[in-house]
Image: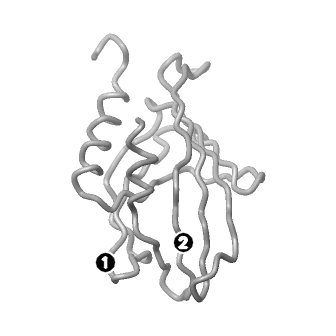
């Protein structure tokens, strides 16, 4: 999944409805391992959200997420409240718990109880390829 950091580096900055701030969401690292509970593949990523106001950086937030791939539903998501600088709707991949408590997120050092995580991938070709790869990686080892 070396493509995730590359895909997010090519993303535009995003604005949420009602905010003047722009945010660049950048995945820095991706790791796969074995989830101790499911014995299946687990996914971990480290991300930064760099916030800009009036062209100047005003914050840098950190986000780490870990989840067993077999325990999440993976889908493409159009975001209703986030838009690119040009006004295009933000698009990405959503990872939503199929079983309670499967997503473990840490925002700026604080644990989150969110039952899902996502990643913006504006480039449609890269998004389709990465979405397909997650579909393959979700399969149990004997099904590959």
Looking at the picture, tell me which residue is in the foreground, 82 or 52.
Answer: 52
Which quarter of the figure has residue 122? bottom left
Q: Is residue 43 above or below residue 75?
A: above
Tell me how many marks there are. Answer: 2
Residue at 55 percent across and 41 percent down: it is: 29
Q: Secondary structure at mark 1?
A: loop
Residue at 52 percent across and 37 percent down: it is: 30
In percent of width and height, residue 95 lies at: 44, 47
Q: Quadrant of the C terminus?
A: top left
In percent of width and height, residue 136 lies at: 30, 29
Pointer 1 or 2: first along the chain: 2
The answer to whether mark 1 and mark 2 are in CB contact below 8 A is: no
Q: Residues within 10 Å of mark 1 (few under 14, many from 20)?
A: few
Q: Is residue 133 above or below residue 49?
A: above
Q: Secondary structure at mark 2?
A: strand
Judging by the rendered image, the residue that carries numbered circle 2 is 23
Residue at 54 percent across and 31 percent down: it is: 31
In percent of width and height, residue 38 lies at: 53, 20
Q: Is residue 41 left or right of residue 100?
A: left
Judging by the rendered image, the residue that carries numbered circle 1 is 88
Looking at the picture, tell me which residue is in the foreground, 101 or 20.
Answer: 20
Q: Residues within 10 Å of mark 2 (few under 14, many from 20)?
A: many
Q: Quadrant of the N terminus?
A: top left
| Residue extending furthest toward the top | 142
Q: Is residue 144 above or below residue 132?
A: above
Q: Is residue 93 above or below residue 23?
A: above
Q: Is residue 27 left or right of residue 88?
A: right
Mark number displayed over residue 73 = none
In percent of width and height, residue 106 lies at: 69, 49
| Residue extending furthest toward the front | 56
């Amino acid at each position: 999944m070396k493509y995730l950091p590359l895909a997010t580096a090519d993303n535009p900055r995003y604005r949420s409805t009602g905010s003047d701030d722009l945010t660049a969401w950048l995945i820095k690292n991706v790791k796969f391992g074995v989830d101790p509970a499911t014995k299946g593949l687990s996914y971990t990523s480290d991300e930064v959200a760099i916030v800009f106001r009036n062209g100047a950086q005003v914050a840098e937030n950190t986000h780490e997420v870990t989840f067993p791939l077999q325990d999440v539903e993976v889908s493409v998501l159009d975001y209703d409240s986030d838009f690119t600088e040009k006004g295009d709707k933000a698009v990405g991949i959503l990872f939503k718990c199929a079983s309670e408590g499967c997503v473990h997120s840490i925002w700026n050092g604080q644990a989150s109880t969110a039952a899902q995580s996502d990643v913006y991938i504006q480039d449609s070709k890269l998004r389709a390829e990465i979405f397909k790869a997650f579909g393959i990686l979700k399969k149990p080892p004997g099904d590959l």
